[in-house]
Structures are given as C-alpha cells and as structure tokens.
Amino acid sequence: MFLNKKKIIIISAIVLVVILVVSLIIYFNTRIVEDNSGFTLKDDLTINVYSDVKVKDFIKDIDGKVVDNKKVDTTFLGTVDVEFIYLNKDNKKRKGTFEVEVKDLEEPLIWLSNSYSVRVGEDVNLEEEILCVDNYDNNPSCKITGDYDLNTAGNYSLVYEAEDSSGNTESVDFTLYVYEPREVTGGGSSSDVTSTDFNTILTEHKSDDTLVGIDVSKWQGAIDFAKVKEAGAEFVMIRVGHQNGVGGDYILDPYFKRNIKAAIDNDLEVGIYFYSYADSKKEAKEQAEWVIKQIKDYDITLPVAFDFESFTSFNSMNLSLYQLNEVAESYFSVLEDAGYDTMLYGSKNYLNAIWKYNTNKVWLAHYTDETDYDKDYMMWQLCQDGVIDGINGYVDIDILYK
C-alpha cells in the first residue's frame, strides 16, 4: 500500500515536470519578443487630432510585413504609445513600439464671407451670430475688432478674429453693411418667378439605379398623395417634427400623421427626418427615442435623417466640430439599434466644413443642375422650388441612389 502511494507521488511529480517543461517550450516558442530593429519610422511622427491613421502610415521601411495594421487613437492631444505585431525577415512574429505626438494643427473656422449685412437698429450680437467654431476646442476665442454702430447706417471695415486653446488663429476681413430697410413697391413680374418641374427631373434623372421623390412638412399643407404618386414620385421624406429652439420641446409636425398614412396608402416608399437643435449626445439620444415613438407603427423603408441647421445658435452651444459629429452619431446609434437605417442631412458647404468627421450616409442639399460634391451621398436634394401635381406650392425634389 505504501509503495503504491509512493509510485503515485513519483508519477504525479514526473507528469507535473513534463507539463512544466512543455509549457515553457510552448511559451518560449510562441511568445512575441519586442524588437524595433526590423523597421524604420518616418521623420515626422506628429499628427493632427482626429486624423484617420493606421500603423503603416508612420512606417518608412520594414524588413518583413505588418500583421495588425490597426488604427491609431488620435482623439486626444499628447503622446500616444503605439504597439503592433509584424513578421520579421525570418518570418517570426515581433512586437514593434513607437510614440506619436497628437496635436491640434488646425485653425478655427469662421463662417463669413467678405461682407455681412444688418438692418439699422437690429438687436443682434455679431460675435454670437456669425459662426465661429474649432475642430477640437469647444470654446475658442472669437471677437470682432474695429468700430461699428448698428443704429447708424453705413459701411464698416472690420476683422473677425478667432484663436483656439492650441494657439491656432484665423481672421477674416469683412465689410459690415448697416442698412435702412427699403419700402417694397409693386409685386414684380411673373418672369421673376422660377420653378422646377417634377417631370423634367424625372426625365433627366430617373434610371434603374435611382428613385425620384420629394420631401415634405407642414409647409406643403394638405397633400393629395394619389396625384403625387400618379405624377411619378416614388418616395417621400416626411418631417416627423422639430425641436423648438435650443433646449426646447419636441414638436410633432401637424401634418405628420396625415402625410405618412396617405403616403403609405399610395404605395410610396417613406423616409423620415427630424429638425434638431441638439447640443449634447444625451439630448440627441432622447430625440431619437422620441422619433421612434412617433414612427414605430408605420412601415419606414428609407432612412431616418438627422437635420441640424441651427448654426446661428451654434456659438452658444459650446461644441467643437468633433463633438457636433458625436451628437449626430448618438442620434444614429439609437435608431440603428432599433432597426432603422439613418443618414445625415446637410448642404454641400456644411458637409465639407462642418460635418467632415461624419461617416454615415449623406442626404446632400445642393440646388444646382449638376453637383460637384466629391464625397459619397445616398440622396440628393437638388431644388427647393419643385412643382408637382398634388401639392399647392413649392416642394423639394430629391434623387435617391440605390
């Protein structure tokens, strides 16, 4: 009995030793050794904040190949430690390390041309009214230099200056025109009125790869969707509601229920948009949840859009451009989690300058015969003076690309 126990102990000890030896062999054969000798880095390892860069963007030469070309986090300023795995010339895995310096290299944006007009006596704060925003800093210094009097008509030569917390500066020379309102006499001639016929757009843009439609709200009044459908419209983007200013309540469009029921009854594909003043991710999330409550009982076949155009109020929101894009993304995430497709609405210039961090689908507003917007877009709102049977007045016309 004693000998059997002794044998068991000896055998157990041998097994443990074998396991330990095998484990050590496996460890030393599979462990990834840190080795920076197999590659060289570019001379400049400074990168602008929020840049979309990966490991390979910093490597000049490598005697092998990068295994995990992962994205480098550039969402904060300072030194970032980067680790990656590569195969060396002997085809063995090695760990490479290096540091990059993330800086804000971008000047603030002042949304201003070489002139700005204000009526005599108008109660307006120009420094708040004129959009002044930074990519990173949520509260850049924005000021107007030069003398002017909003109560006295005249032309004033001024400079709008902006500086962010990283010391980047921008300035715009402009002329402020303070003018006396002129009395309007006569209604003009009928030749002054322009419009875009829906049939013309249908002829020019309808193909196997497109749908032609409209977007509507209370401003179109009572719509005869049977006539709209008969006129050739294939879809409609319907405003579900809007926010009543910054921090305001969410207001259901008074024609929403009528519009969506009639559109669906007439076999039009339906998408939704909400006009937002959201100034935080939390509020954008709440707006998306409110939208879902309004549309959950309807068959929504097209995206639910985020429509943010409140840029005359933007300076008071204390948001950076990146943070604004995060606000929109918060709205999208809630809707996508609920099973809806989403997209961002914006004009060409705002998409290029304000929404430059957006990665979502785009509903482009550009009123022209042929857009030169050079990024991807899902839908194009090409006019606001459309005329179609079934609507008494103007309507926006849109092209949806499949």
Image (cartoon, grey):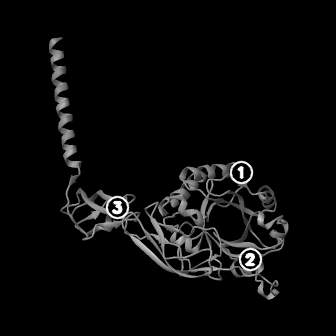
Mark found first going from the N terminus, 3 or 2: 3
Local crowd size for mark 1, using a 10 Å CA cut-off: few (<14), some (14–19), many (≥20): some
The N terminus, quarter of image = top left
The image shows residue 188 at horizontal and vertical percentages of 80, 86
From the image, state whether disc 1 or disc 3 is nearer to you. Answer: 1
Residue hosting label 1: 294
Which label number is shown at residue 69? 3
Amino acid residing under circle 3: Asn
Instruction: From this view, report whether residue 80 is shown above or below residue 111.
Output: above
Inter-mark Cα distance, 3 to 2: 49 Å
Which mark, residue 385?
A: 2
Left of 248 or right of it: where is 376? left
The one of 319 and 196 positioned closer to us in this rendering: 319
Q: Nearer the viewer, mark 1 or mark 2?
A: 2
Nearer to me, 8 or 223:
223
First along the sequence among labels 1 and 3 = 3
Q: Helix or strand or loop: what does disc 3 sit on? A: loop
Q: Which mark is residue 75?
A: none
Amino acid carrying mark 2 in the image: Asp
Q: Secondary structure at mark 2?
A: strand
Q: Quarter of the image containing the C terminus?
A: bottom right
Describe residue 355's horizontal placement relative to residue 92 as left or right.
right
Question: 123 or 223: which is nearer to us?
Answer: 123
Write down the quadrant of residue 129 in the picture: bottom right
Residue 211 x/y as whole percent: 69, 71
Q: What separation in Å lies between label 1 and label 2 (alpha carbons)?
A: 28 Å
Please provide percent x and percent y for residue 125: 57, 67
Tell me whether circle 1 and circle 2 mark residues in contact (CB < 8 Å).
Answer: no
